[in-house]
Image (cartoon, rainbow, N blue to C red):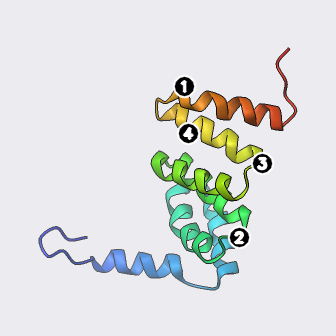
């Protein structure tokens, strides 16, 4: 965004068009490729539209949350993980990721119950 004019730059518009290009399935595949290449910010840009278009699909939303987490977009990761857990409350990996995200945000007390629940759901009981 150009600060002086308030308009999007041409490069931003081209990047947005690239990220939104193709069918949902093509964008899902492209988002996975960017994630596997550790291009987490780009993966998130591609996956956000996939998650919006297919909110009933867990995999794209979980990968989006992971991309946010790995690109240090922790507030976005938290929001996506909370939305996932609202729809799929027994998703143990999302619960674990939420706990880890909250830890990275410096909210260890809030993270602890999520981490304990994820461990219990995965069958990891403390001795």
Question: In terms of image quadrants, where is residue 57?
Answer: bottom right
The crowd level at tag 2 (other Cα within 10 Å; few <14, some 14-19, many 20+) is few
Marks 2 and 3, the one that precedes in the sequence: 2
- Who comes first in sequence, dot 1 or dot 3? 3
| Residue receiving disc 1 | 109
Real-space Cα distance between discs 4 and 2? Answer: 23 Å
Image mark for residue 101? 4
Name the residue nearer the viewer: 15 or 113.
113
Q: Secondary structure at mark 3?
A: loop
Where does residue 82 sit, x and y in percent of width and height? 59, 51
The crowd level at tag 3 (other Cα within 10 Å; few <14, some 14-19, many 20+) is some
| Viewer can see residue 72 | no
Measure how far apart labels 2 and 1 are at the Cα level: 31 Å
- Where 11 sits versus 80, above or below? below
Disc 4: CA contacts within 10 A as few (<14), some (14-19) or many (>=20): many
State the residue position of label 3: 90
- Above or below: residue 43 compared with residue 19: above
Is disc 1 placed on a helix, strand or loop? helix
Q: Residues within 10 Å of mark 1 (few under 14, many from 20)?
A: few
The quadrant of the rendering that contains the C terminus is top right
Q: CA distance from mark 2 to mark 3?
A: 15 Å
Can you say whether 63 is above or below 91 in the image? below
């Amino acid at each position: 965004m150009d600060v002086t004019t308030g308009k999007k730059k041409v490069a931003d518009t081209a990047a947005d068009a690239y990220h939104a290009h193709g069918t949902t399935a093509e964008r899902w595949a492209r988002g996975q490729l960017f994630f596997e290449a550790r291009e987490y910010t780009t993966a998130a840009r591609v996956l956000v539209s996939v998650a919006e278009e297919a909110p009933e699909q867990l995999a794209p939303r979980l990968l989006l949350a992971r991309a946010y987490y790995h690109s240090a977009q922790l507030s976005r990761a938290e929001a996506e993980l909370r939305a996932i857990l609202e729809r799929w409350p027994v998703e143990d990996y999302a619960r674990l990721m939420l706990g880890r995200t909250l830890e990275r945000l410096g909210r260890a007390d809030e993270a602890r119950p999520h981490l304990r629940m994820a461990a219990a759901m995965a069958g990891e009981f403390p001795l």
